Image: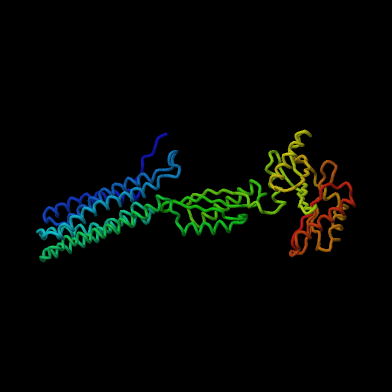
Amino acid sequence: MVQTPHRMRASERAALFSVAVTVALVALKFLVWGATGSLVVLSQALDSVLDLVALGLVFFGIRMAGKPADHDHQYGHAKAENLAAFTQTLIIGGVVLLVVIEAFRRLGDRPEAVKVPWYALTLLVVSLVIDLVRVSVLHRTARAEGSEALRAGALNIAGDVGTAIVALVSLILVRLDFLDADAVGALVVSVVLIVLAWRIGRRSVDVLMDRAPETRAEAITKAVEAVRGVQEARRVRVRGSGDQLFADVTVAAGRTATLERAHDIAENVEREIERVAPGIDVVVHVEPISETHGMVERVAAAASRAENVHEVHNVLVHAFDEGGSRKLHVTLHAKVEPGLSLKDAHDLSEAVEAAIEAELAADVRVDTHIEPLQPTTFGQDVTASRPDVIEIVTRCAVEEPDVVDCHEVLVTSIDAELSIVAHVHARADLPLARIHDASTRIEAGIHAAMPEVGPVTIHFEPA
């Protein structure tokens, strides 16, 4: 496959432009230093050398950060920019130390003669104007592309603007016979460099040490907790650099939630996080809710963990107090593959019972009914030809005091057996348990009137 040539990004062009300008400034300032012998000008020249090295690192860092993730760097190369920015602080620290030592030596001794020709002042003014242009270009590009390395470079050169002003004022004072102004100006430059180094270094170390951006982490946690189906946001970890963030989120959901439901919850969590932090890379882990959740749900969850169990239903838990000790009796139905032999089904039943006993950790008896998983069956809609069935279903439904009406009945013939679905209205404020009892009575009435009817489904809707 033919590889397309690398296209230089705006951040790379800005860094390369600044490197080229800095080379010219280094030569310019060393010429001024050679003409004046000024310590403050030397510090300015050394600072420009620092800029040259630092911007070279910035350019390298940006090029490296632009690479896509690979086998050895699965989270990408974005931290290369922060590593380059941190390296700048180390270089700045070394230069500042040398300047401070020399400044104190000159203040302690007899001031050295410093020449200040007019062209030296002119060259410093030119340097100051160029630095202002560089700061504007780097800062604008850093803000547009979210580049930490360019932002660090802009801060560094912004310090150069201040130190250039200090150097200019110092040389003017020296020309007016204030000889100590040169060493004092060098110390002022050193203080500015120390402040800049601290700001750049602290930000870079925070990213390299994966310090969580607090405002983002709080917003993400609130978004996760608001997702429907999330019972608890157990852990939210956020790290990253600039606009490239990674989130590792663990949430708790109901223990009987299916794999598909757990996947839907994870997808919804990702969408909510993306809403508050666009472009973030999210990994969501779904765990079951605490062990102390409802007894029936704990039984269903334990039974579902047994291999080859496809569905658990009709779970009943009875508690008895015998002789001052609490005993439990659990019954349930579990659906398995229809081809299992009686021996295999019995073994599976014992595995289910053992899982429930381990889950409840109490004096418990478990009885399991194993039934085959029903395959898809084909039927025929006979609603239009069975008005007698519709009449009986409607009568059984409206006899219930909580039923407002029966507005739809579907009758299906499956293997010489009738399957019925009835849609009824009831008051919206009725409790679910009361609705369930009404459904049970309607089904019993239908079966008593028509023995040939098989499964009956009563669908309640709010009136």
Residue sitting nearer the eye, 258 or 99: 99
Q: Left or right of 109: which side holds 399?
A: right
Q: Is residue 386 left or right of residue 112?
A: right
Q: Is residue 318 visible?
A: yes
Q: Quadrant of residue 432?
A: bottom right
Q: Residue at x 74, y 64 (%)?
A: 428
Which x, y percent locates residue 44?
20, 55
Residue in the foreground of this view, choosing between 202 and 109: 109
The answer to whether any part of residue 114 appears in the image is no
Seen at 38% across and 52% down, the residue is 205
In this rendered view, identify the residue nearer to me: 59 or 240.
240
Provide residue 193's location: percent of width, then percent of height: 27, 57
Q: Position of residue 414 (x, y in %)?
A: 81, 43
Q: Quadrant of the N terminus?
A: top left
Residue found at x 20% / y 62%: 166
Considering every residue shown, the one lying at the far front of the view is 323
Q: How many labels were placed on the picture?
A: 0
Identify the image quadrant of residue 146: bottom left
453 or 49: nearer the viewer: 49
Looking at the image, residue 387 sits to the left or right of residue 123; the answer is right
Q: Quadrant of the C terminus?
A: bottom right
Q: How is the image coloured?
A: rainbow
- What percent of the width, then of the height, locates residue 22? 23, 51
Q: Please give left or right for residue 54 compared with residue 413 in the image.
A: left
